[in-house]
Each structure stands twice: as structure tokens, then as C-alpha cells.
Amino acid sequence: MVKVIRGDITQLKVDAIVNAANNTLLGGGGVDGAIHRAAGPELLQACRTLGGCRTGDAKITPGFALPATYVIHAVGPVWHGGKQEEDALLSSAYRRSLEVARENGIHSIAFPSISTGAYGFPIDRASKIAISTIRDYLHECKSVMEVFLVAFSEGDFQIIKQILERDPA
Ligand code: AR6
């Protein structure tokens, strides 16, 4: 099941929230900054032990002070116009997050719109990739995981909602 909701991902009481991180996993702006602030300094300490993360991959930590039990730190691609494997790398960031979630017995997970802020990936294209990757994965694994796409703005919410409705699973 994939659903879109509007709001602040740091407030969600789910098994795992996904962070749109960078290769260092040592924090940044955007949703990454918000997650680190809400989780508290232990999150950075935990991230320091992970040795960074490749683009398209994901690693897990506890959620510390967050309502969510875990944070899955995923690294999406920087948008360079679409000819540098951006689509495949974005899809991989979603897929790897779901694989890590499954390995950790996670039943509910919330994603921000990875790569569509500072990394400049067009929201419409990114949302289609997110939805098809998640649906394919759930189908392949016969998984009943609850997956939430969290839109931070009303504009993003409407775009994601339309894509979900246009092509209902
Ligand atoms: N809850 C949900 N979504 C949010 C929140 C929030 N609290 N805050 C921002 N967003 P971005 P990226 C949305 O820039 O493009 C960081 O510095 C935001 O509106 O956070 O993957 C990292 O360290 C946008 O739709 O991530 C990296 O260096 C989405 O989250 C770099 O930015 C992603 O925007 C990653 O860039």
C-alpha cells in the first residue's frame, strides 16, 4: 500500500522514516537537517560509525528522540539533466531503503521526496519513479508494508496524489 500525506516527516510515528541524506551521512540542510535536529545529537554519533553511503544506497540507524523507531538514510542523485543515470540511482535509493526496511522487520515506512530539494530532481519525474519502484517492490515481495510518501508542500502533495490516482495499483 502506497499513500501520500502532507506534513513534516519528523513528526510521524512509523517504524521508519527515510532521510534524504548525502554521501557523508553527517547531516546537512533540508529534511536531513530537520531529522537530525528532531532526533538529537546521538543520531550524528550513530551516523559517524557508518562510513558514509554510496549514491543509490541506504543505511539504517535508530531514531533516538524521534517518534519513529528507525531512520533509514538514503542517498539520491544530484540532478544533472537526466543523462547521468539519475533515474536509475533514484529508483535504487527507494529500493535499497525498502530492502533495508524488510531486513529489519519494518512494517511502516515514510519517505520524503528524495533528491527533489537541494539536489534539483524534477518532482513529477521523481514521484513517478518513487511510486513505480515502491509498487514493483511490494508486488515482488508480496509485502504488506505500509508506505507513506510525505509531501512537504501543497504543490508536491497535489502532484503525487494525481500520479497515484492516474495509475491506481
Ligand atoms: N518533512 C518532509 N519533507 C521535507 C522536510 C520535512 N521536515 N523538510 C524538507 N522536506 P532536500 P535532497 C522536503 O533538499 O534534494 C541535504 O542538505 C523538501 O521540500 O531535503 O535529496 C542533504 O544533506 C523536498 O521536497 O533533499 C543533502 O546534501 C524533499 O524534502 C541534500 O540536502 C527533499 O529535499 C539532499 O538533497
Image (cartoon, rainbow, N blue to C red):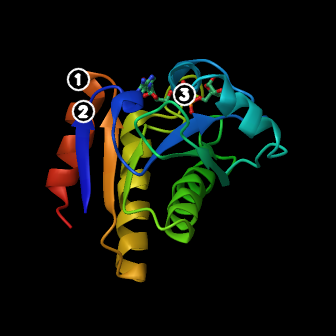
Q: Amino acid at mark 1?
A: Glu
Q: In terms of sequence position, does the residue under pointer 3 or pointer 1 come before the other?
A: 3
Q: Which residue is mark 1?
A: 154
**Which residue is rendered at x = 35% and y = 77% of the image?**
139
Pointers 1 and 2 in contact (C-beta within 8 Å): yes
Disc 3 marks which residue?
39
Q: Which quadrant, please, contains the C terminus?
A: bottom left
- Mark number for residue 157? 2
Q: Position of residue 52 (x, y in %)?
A: 80, 42
The answer to whether residue 5 shows anywhere in this view is: yes
Residue 23 appears anywhere in the view? no
The type of residue carrying mark 3 is Ala
- In the displayed structure, 121 sits above or below 75; it is above
Whether residue 20 sits left or right of residue 23 in the image: it is: left
Q: Is residue 73 left or right of residue 128?
A: right
Q: Which picture quadrant has residue 68?
A: top left
Pointer 2 local density, CA inside 10 Å: few below 14, some 14–19, many at least 20: some
Identify whether 166 is placed above or below 82: below
Of residues 127 and 97, the one drawn nearer to the viewer in this rendering: 97
The residue closer to the viewer here, 136 or 120, is: 136
Looking at numbered disc 2 in the image, what kind of residue is underneath it?
Answer: Phe
Q: Secondary structure at mark 2?
A: helix
Q: Residue at x 56, y 18 (%)?
A: 37
Q: CA distance from mark 2 to mark 3?
A: 25 Å
Residue sitting at 30 percent across and 22 percent down?
153
